[in-house]
Image (cartoon, grey):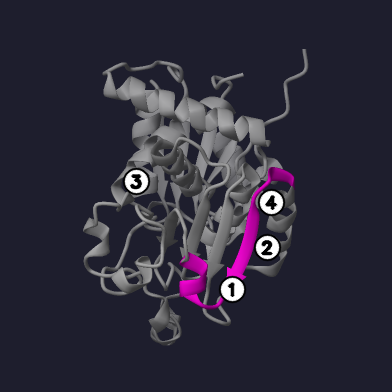
Amino acid sequence: MPKPPLSHFLTGEELPRAELFALLEQAEELRQERRAGHRRQDLAGRSVALLFDKPSLRTRISFAVAIAELGGNPIESVAATRKHEEPEDIVRVLGGYCDALVIRTHEHAIVERMVSKAPVPVVNGLSDSHHPCQVLADLLTLRQYFGKLEGLKFTYIGDGNNMLHSMLLLMPFLGIHVTYACPPGYEPNAFISRVAEGRAREGGGSITAFTDPVEAIRGTNAVYTDVWTSMGFEAQEFEREAAFANYQLNEALYAHAAPGALIMHCMPMIRGKEISETLPEHENSVLFRQSENRLHAQKALLLKLLGKGLA
């Protein structure tokens, strides 16, 4: 019989709505199983390569633990320990050893070049344009606290970066109404925004852009921010701090959100810059639930891509 086509996870657009909802359902089941002390062996005898071209804490550890707790073998390679090779060559070499590949890298084109020659599933652990694995964890967090996704209002304040791109592509597609506020000149990519608008119409959600953070956050169920200067943009740090000065998530801004609104951040964070010193410790802060949920969401994703997920 012919082999089924390979599945990859680069932006999240690869999965239809029903499969995204099923993946989140399985992620919650995996979380409950882990809390009960149950360990699985779905990936026994299988290896997953983890390639890191950028520093990593959450992506690196959460994927390694996810693979190990599913009975598999995580194999890490960081950029400092290997010579330069073309992405098309790397993925074919690793495809001869491993059953899947997770990469955290710079330009999104590197991930796409790998997929063009990949003999095994490829997961985007982060690129300059997209961070879909983090948004899976964020969706799981919202689902845990609200019991649903459809109809929620979600607000992002800050840079129009890879995080916002992935939020726009995935959240409205699952029925969430997303508002965001970015300083002029730091808006999300126009092409990605157009694609996201079409997906929002299909999924029943919506996207509304503001320049005023107060208008964006008014009445929201959850508010999210990220660092003002992402990895690779350090040379712009001082000019970015000036541009983002009025976009800090702090107590005054948070007061305009709905009562009990969740406070979210993908981390690492710089307290006192994009988020106030004290909001991360607020009773409605879910930052560390988000980071834990990377583990559960990525377990479900690996099972899906390697043929062990929910039907």
- Label 3: which residue? 291
CA separation, marks 3 and 1?
26 Å
Instruction: Report x, y in % for residue 297.
Output: 45, 35
* Residue 227 or residue 217, whichever sits in front: 217
Residue under label 4, please give it: 200
Residue of label 1 = 187
**Residue drawn at (38%, 54%), measured in percent from left and top?**
261
Read off the magenta span: 202-217
167 relative position to 63: left or right: right
Tell us which disc is closer to us: 3 or 4: 4
Mark before the other along the chain sequence, 2 or 1: 1
Tag 3 secondary structure: helix
Quarter of the image holding residue 227? bottom left
Residue 151 counted in the magenta span:
no
Separation (CA) of disc 4 from disc 1? 18 Å
Compare residues 188 and 139 and report the one nearer the observer. Answer: 139
Q: In what element is the residue under mark 1?
A: loop
Q: Are marks 2 and 1 in contact (CB under 8 Å)?
A: yes
Element type at marker 2?
helix
